[in-house]
């Protein structure tokens, strides 16, 4: 069966910037597929290429098996929800939602009925007469969604659609979006730089870095089996260990990653690596506590439920790590020209589990 969306070796450059650099992936019918990456990594450009607002320099884009690389946007069977929603301020909510049907010359009665149904689907049944300016951010977001869904697209492209909302509303909308996607069976290609959003909603996630896909995997695959140091630290927090600490973990002359919650206090069994160290610092975070430990001349971070917390700075401790939680990392596309992307290479930062701290990104 042909994929809902397929990119084959797609490249798009702007001057010297390779915004999208030889990207290939398939999105299956009905899949919730996310593109996750830092700012400037090429996510929006990728989405605009699928929608047809940009054309690729090389490669091909297929929708449901048809090559649409040269097809104008309005003839591609996709709809887009933009981050700023792009609602028409002078039109009522109902007219905004019905707009796509008006363009297609659907009679007024029918388009208004369908727009009302769509407003009910996104749980805004009583807002039809209001103008966008009279709505909250979350309500505007739903109107934008209803407007995109009314054309019954088989593929919906969403560019950071929840970016403008506060955390609580964003979490609510994540649940609603996910259940709407399931209910309507539409393929979603969802762009975000928020790892929680990507992990929590997606069937699969493509992590994009400098215009390339660094890993494409299920959420738990990304978290449990990160391929590179960039993935290990961009998706969750990780100890990225080299030198004596990697050797103590049984992987001499390699770089390995260990999630802080897989490091536990106390002696381990046959399948664990047991290490001794000293507590450098403790941070209390409510449900969990974080410990920075000095182990094998390096820093190792441990996170455990605060109820299990049991050590003070200066104290000598024994910790253990399941051998299965220690992952060898590959160098990130080391043989390839990284291009002039704006993102600092995570391997160049204070990442090694050296004296300056454990390798980690955003908690
Ligand atoms: N029209 C354009 N002209 C020149 N450069 C562009 C253009 N559009 C994007 N770029 C550049 O291409 C790169 C990728 O941009 P893109 O908007 O795809 O990133 P993004 O991953 O969506 O970032 P963000 O998370 O900040 O939205 C950036 O370096 C950006 O400056
Ligand atoms: Mg963007």
Image (cartoon, rainbow, N blue to C red):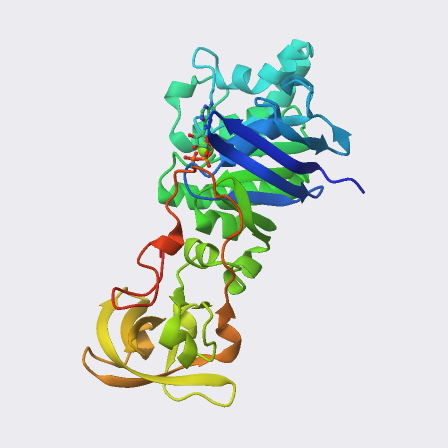
Residue at position x 38%, y 79% from top? Answer: 264
Image x and y of residue 251, in percent = 47, 76
In the picture, the quarter occupied by the C terminus is bottom left
Image x and y of residue 56, in percent = 61, 27
Relative to residue 347, is residue 42 drawn left or right?
right
Image: 345 above or below 251: above
In the picture, the quarter occupied by the N terminus is top right
- The extreme right residue here reads 1
Relative to residue 105, is residue 126 drawn left or right?
left
Image x and y of residue 172, in percent = 45, 44
Q: Quadrant of ligand 1?
A: top left
Closer to the camera, 356 or 243?
Answer: 243
Residue at position x 69%, y 12% from top? Answer: 106
| Residue 334 seen | yes
Relative to residue 111, is residue 176 drawn left or right?
left
Image x and y of residue 249, in percent = 43, 79
The image quadrant that residue 301 belongs to is bottom left
Residue at position x 72%, y 32% from top? Answer: 62
């Amino acid at each position: 069966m042909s994929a809902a969306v397929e990119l084959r070796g797609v490249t798009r450059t702007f001057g010297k910037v390779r915004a999208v650099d030889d990207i290939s992936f398939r999105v299956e019918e009905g899949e919730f597929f996310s593109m996750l990456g830092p700012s400037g990594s090429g996510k929006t450009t990728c989405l605009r290429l699928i929608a047809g607002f940009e054309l690729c320099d090389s490669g091909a884009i297929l929708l449901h098996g048809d090559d649409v690389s040269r097809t104008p946007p309005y003839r591609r069977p996709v709809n887009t929800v933009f981050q700023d929603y792009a609602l028409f301020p002078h039109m009522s909510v109902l007219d905004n939602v019905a707009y796509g049907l008006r363009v297609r010359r659907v009679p007024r009665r029918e388009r208004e009925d369908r727009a009302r149904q769509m407003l009910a689907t996104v749980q805004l049944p009583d807002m039809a007469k209001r103008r966008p300016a009279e709505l909250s951010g979350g309500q505007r977001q739903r109107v934008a969604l209803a407007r995109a869904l009314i054309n019954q697209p088989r593929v919906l492209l969403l560019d950071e659609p929840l970016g403008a909302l506060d955390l609580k509303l964003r979490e609510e909308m994540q649940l609603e979006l996910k259940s709407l996607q399931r209910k309507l069976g539409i393929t979603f290609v969802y762009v975000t730089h928020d790892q929680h959003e990507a992990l929590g909603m997606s069937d699969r996630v493509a992590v994009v870095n400098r215009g390339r896909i660094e890993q494409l995997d299920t959420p738990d695959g990304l978290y449990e089996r990160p391929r590179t140091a960039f993935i290990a630290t961009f998706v969750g927090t990780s100890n990225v260990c080299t030198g004596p600490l990697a050797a103590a973990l049984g992987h001499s002359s390699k770089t390995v990653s260990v999630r802080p919650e897989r490091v536990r206090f106390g002696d381990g069994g046959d399948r664990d690596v047991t290490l001794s160290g000293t507590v450098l610092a403790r941070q209390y975070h409510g449900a969990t506590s974080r410990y920075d430990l000095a182990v094998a001349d390096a820093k190792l971070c441990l996170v455990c439920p605060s109820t299990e917390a049991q050590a003070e700075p200066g104290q000598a401790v024994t910790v253990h790590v399941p051998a299965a939680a220690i992952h060898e990392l590959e160098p990130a596309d080391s043989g390839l020209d990284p291009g002039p992307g704006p993102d600092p290479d995570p391997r160049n930062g204070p990442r090694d589990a050296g004296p300056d701290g454990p390798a980690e990104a955003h908690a």
